[in-house]
Image (spheres, rainbow, N blue to C red):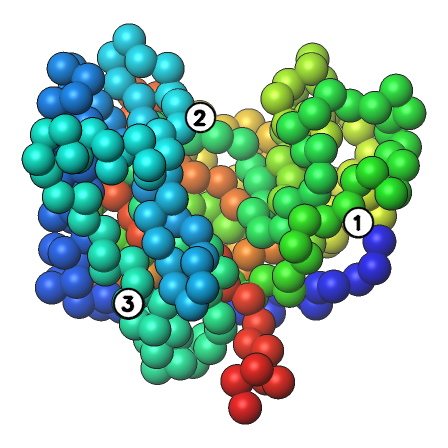
Amino acid sequence: MHQFWTEPKHKSQTIKGFLDQGFINKILKDYQHAKSVLTKSYRRPIDIHEVNTKFYKDHFILNEFKIGGDGIKQSNLPVERYEKLCRRLNERVGFEWFKDTQNILEDKFKKHNIPSELVTLNIHNLPNSFEIHTDGVNITHRDKPRPDSFPHYPEHKYVPIEPQNFSHQGLITLQNNGPKNGTIIFDQWCPISTYLVQDENYNGHYKSNIRFHRGESLERFGVKVNGYTNTDLPDEDYDIITKATDGSITKEKCHGLTLDEILLFGDPGNLSVWAVKKYHLPVPLGRDDWSQNRIMLQYEAKEINKETKE
């Protein structure tokens, strides 16, 4: 695989007061309005787990919702269908502020000495935690069954989709009612999106091509888990993580890893930011402990292309 990345360099940190309350209120108003539209349409309470955008011409626009609820399996709702629901109910669509968000965030990145270009932009209110993982560049066929040649992958079939040298990613707190809501960041990293599931044997999981299970090699597609120690998580790190997860994590899950930071979401306007390529884990882990009201503005950014910015 051609190397399109550099090592992660951005500090894992919380920047307090990153986004002002006026803009936060504008985002939450449209989010709650969309929940109301969907609840009226489905005639039952609807949860919006994600509001996703796409980049069109020179700005971000509304693309789809990921929704769920009691008796409703999580599903994607394209913007075209949402617009039809709004017309039928004589309701506004909203989310026009997405158009201005790129300039707002990129100006604030410069102000806080983390200059980057925005690549993705979404709203998250996720229903549960999930495995230790990296985000960023996706590989082709990541959600297809493993090839018969596993653990060997034909290089021409498994290639990066839109390879980017991602810089940092972040979660900006919009609304948060859980004092332990946050993200654990590890020192280890990978240039493509993968999952570390070292405490489970492989059994045909979804996205199995990008999941490293118990006993499997940590090299795939010409990349590897960088900085892996091949030893247990240090006791000091384990004690800190145990407190953050109320003792619901095992050393096996974190084998080979070391703790970078634990970033708590805290008050509205705070930015939790870390290098895209680093492995991380949303907390808390227990379903009963997971807050259903952790609404975040989520983004990924890449290194600035100096040729296009000059």
Is residue 43 toward the left or the right of residue 108 in the image? left
Disc with the residue nearer the chain's start (2 vs 1): 1
Disc with the residue nearer the chain's start (2 vs 3): 3
Q: CA distance from mark 2 to mark 3?
A: 41 Å
Q: What amino acid is found at the position of numbered circle 1 in the picture?
A: Val
Q: Is residue 121 visible?
A: yes
The quarter of the picture where the C terminus appears is: bottom right
Camera-near label (1 vs 3) is 3
Q: Position of residue 237 (x, y in %)?
A: 53, 46
Which residue corresponds to mark 2? Answer: 248
Q: What amino acid is found at the position of numbered circle 2 in the picture?
A: Ser
Disc with the residue nearer the chain's start (1 vs 3): 3
Above or below for 41 versus 297:
above
Q: Few, some or many C-alpha atoms within 10 Å of disc 1 (few <14, some 14-19, many ≥20)?
A: few
Q: CA distance from mark 2 to mark 1?
A: 30 Å
**Observer-nearest residue: 302 or 261?**
302
Q: Which mark is residue 100?
A: 3
Tell me what residue is drawn at x 40 percent, y 28 percent: 76
Tell me what residue is drawn at x 38 percent, y 58 percent: 60
Q: Secondary structure at mark 1?
A: strand
Q: Position of residue 171 (x, y in %)?
A: 36, 53
Instruction: Return the residue found at the far left.
Output: 90
**Callout 2–callout 1 Cβ contact below 8 Å:** no
